[in-house]
């Protein structure tokens, strides 16, 4: 039946995800094991190896943190979340990081504040992921990250993040949100997967538009709470 088909599709999706996780976790584990083995065999401590090991540990930690977000109980209570305030907080927090990367953050936030029903920490995590990606996309260039928050006419809020980064090639656009898809040497490729899931669970939409070499725009719409 249709129901069964959907279920088996879901299970194979989970299987793929599990295989991906196992694979991504095995890489840093293998390298940790190798470095430890070397140190044991030679009976010496190497700062150089220890530093590589630290990077691998951080990577493992990042992968696990991203997945923890997905394990949230479906029953977690949705509360009124002030979107303007979150956006303001996040742009403040990221300002320093941006300046260090030759990026200026410009915010345009509707003075009327609006709330959506949701889980504040999860929404924060989404905005942080998007801002971080925007700043990283402008690596090696000077640019601006525009963040806009405004109420739409149909009781939704629009959040726009527009960067002047390297953009996303057309054939990669459909990969946004695919687990472990990354073009970064130290990326996890999990930030967007988690972001899409969070926005979906908040009954919102997340859309990417991009022009290679010009920049990328991420638009998130969420229903306002009443
Ligand atoms: P990560 O940042 O660890 O690579 P993400 O899931 O956050 O993982 O992003 C996946 C990929 O999507 C990135 O590696 C990058 O190629 C692409 N991407 C996401 N946001 C942007 C952006 N604003 N500009 C250009 N590329 C982006
Ligand atoms: Mg990212």
Image (cartoon, rainbow, N blue to C red):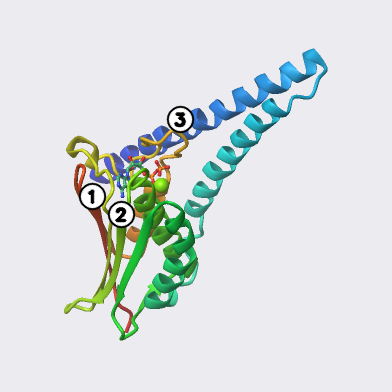
Q: Position of residue 167 (x, y in %)?
A: 24, 44
Label 3: few (<14), some or many (≥20) within 10 Å?
A: few
Queried on whether the Cβ of the residue with tag 1 lies below 8 angstroms from ligand 1, the answer reads: yes
Q: Do the residues labelled 2 and 1 touch (CB within 8 Å)?
A: yes
As drawn, 130 above or below 60:
below
Provide the residue designation for mark 2: 143
Q: Which of marks 2 and 1 is nearer the N terminus?
A: 2
Q: Residue 90 carries which label?
A: none
As drawn, 218 above or below 63:
below
Provide the residue designation for mark 3: 19
The residue under the point 39% across, 47% down is 136
Label 1: few (<14), some or many (≥20) within 10 Å?
A: many
Q: In this view, does 86 lie to the left or right of 60?
A: left
Q: Where is residue 26 in the image (x, y as percent from the top left)?
A: 55, 27
Q: Position of residue 82 (x, y in %)?
A: 41, 78
Q: Which quadrant would the N terminus be assigned to in this image?
A: top left
């Amino acid at each position: 039946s249709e129901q069964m088909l959907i279920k088996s599709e879901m299970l194979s999706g989970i299987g793929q995800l599990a295989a991906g996780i196992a694979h991504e976790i095995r890489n840093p584990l293998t390298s940790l094991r190798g470095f430890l083995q070397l140190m044991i065999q030679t009976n010496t401590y190497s700062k150089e190896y220890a530093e590589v090991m630290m990077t691998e540990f951080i990577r493992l930690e990042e992968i696990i943190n991203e997945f923890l977000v997905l394990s949230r109980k479906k029953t977690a209570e949705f509360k009124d979340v002030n979107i303007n305030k979150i956006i303001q907080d996040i742009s403040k927090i990221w300002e320093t990081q941006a300046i260090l990367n030759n990026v200026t953050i410009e915010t345009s936030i509707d003075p009327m504040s609006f709330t959506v029903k949701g889980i504040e920490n999860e929404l924060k995590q989404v905005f942080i992921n998007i801002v971080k990606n925007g700043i990283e996309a402008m690596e090696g260039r000077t640019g601006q990250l525009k963040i806009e928050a405004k109420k739409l006419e149909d009781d939704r809020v629009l959040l726009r993040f527009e960067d002047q980064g390297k953009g996303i090639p057309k054939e990669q656009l459909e990969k946004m949100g695919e687990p472990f898809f990354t073009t970064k040497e130290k990326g996890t490729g999990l930030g967007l997967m988690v972001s899409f899931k969070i926005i979906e669970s908040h009954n919102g939409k997340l859309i990417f538009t991009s022009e290679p070499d010009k920049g990328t725009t991420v638009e998130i719409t969420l229903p306002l709470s009443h």
